[in-house]
Amino acid sequence: MDGREFSWVCPDCEEYHLEAVNSSPERVWASDFNVDTTIDDVQQLHENSIRVDTNIPEVLPEDSPITWTVVATGTKRMKPRLHDSRGYTYTVRGKTAMSTYWWCSIRQKDNRCPATVTEKDNSFKPGANPHNHPGDPGALLKTQVRVQVLEFCGSSTDTRAAPVIAEEALQTHKTATSQILHKLENDIRAGQRKRQFLRPPEPS
């Protein structure tokens, strides 16, 4: 050997390598590409930059405890009516020496609501059956206004017009949380009928 170095290459492998190089796709660079260009900083979101709806109450209505109000002459027949804070109303179904049993006021022939409430020692406990209809948020306000209109219109000493009495009753019982646009027409007519019924007959 004369000390020379030789590099041996497999002819089949060399042929495969040349084909792979020749068949590889040509890279096309955008004209505005610059390897020295830095990437813009990503905008960081901070907690105080997130918009928060301040109108959402801290406690949702369905999580709030139910409150109860009994209006002694709340029905059209001047019987007791029970109201809860969800807008449901109840009338007396029966009584015992210790308890009063209420059932939902919705009792149409084609839609008899199965919801009930048991009252004992001024405590109210809903029954197992839920309501099958939505509540009316303005139910208590409507009852209170109607009762006051009938009471004042039925007094012989109150000579104010029924619309004036109805408006005063609305302002008396309306609260900041009522948010109910209560129409007084029905209450005014009820008050006028009450006065007409109590008015002495005209001499013949």
Image: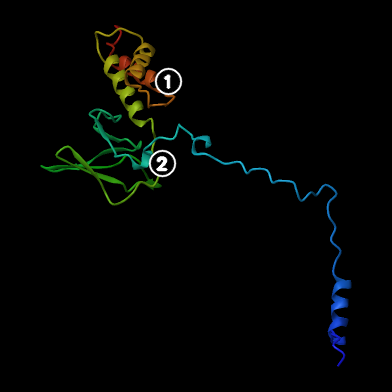
The local secondary structure at tag 1 comes to helix
Q: Which amino acid does label 2 sit on?
A: Pro
Q: What x and y, as percent, mark residue 29?
A: 83, 55
Q: What residue type is labelled 1?
A: Glu
The residue that label 2 is drawn on is 134
The residue that label 1 is drawn on is 185
**Along the line of sight, the residue nearer the viewer: 104 or 52:** 52
Identified at 61% across, 41% down, the residue is 43
Q: Specify few, some or many for label 2: CA neighbours under 10 Å numbering under 14, 14-19, or 20 or more.
A: few
Q: What x and y, as percent, mark residue 42?
A: 62, 44
Residue furthest toward the bottom? 1
Identified at 36% across, 13% down, the residue is 162
Quadrant of the image occupied by residue 142: top left
Vertical placement of 114 versus 52: above or below?
A: below
**Along the line of sight, the residue nearer the viewer: 83 or 58:** 58
The local secondary structure at tag 2 comes to loop
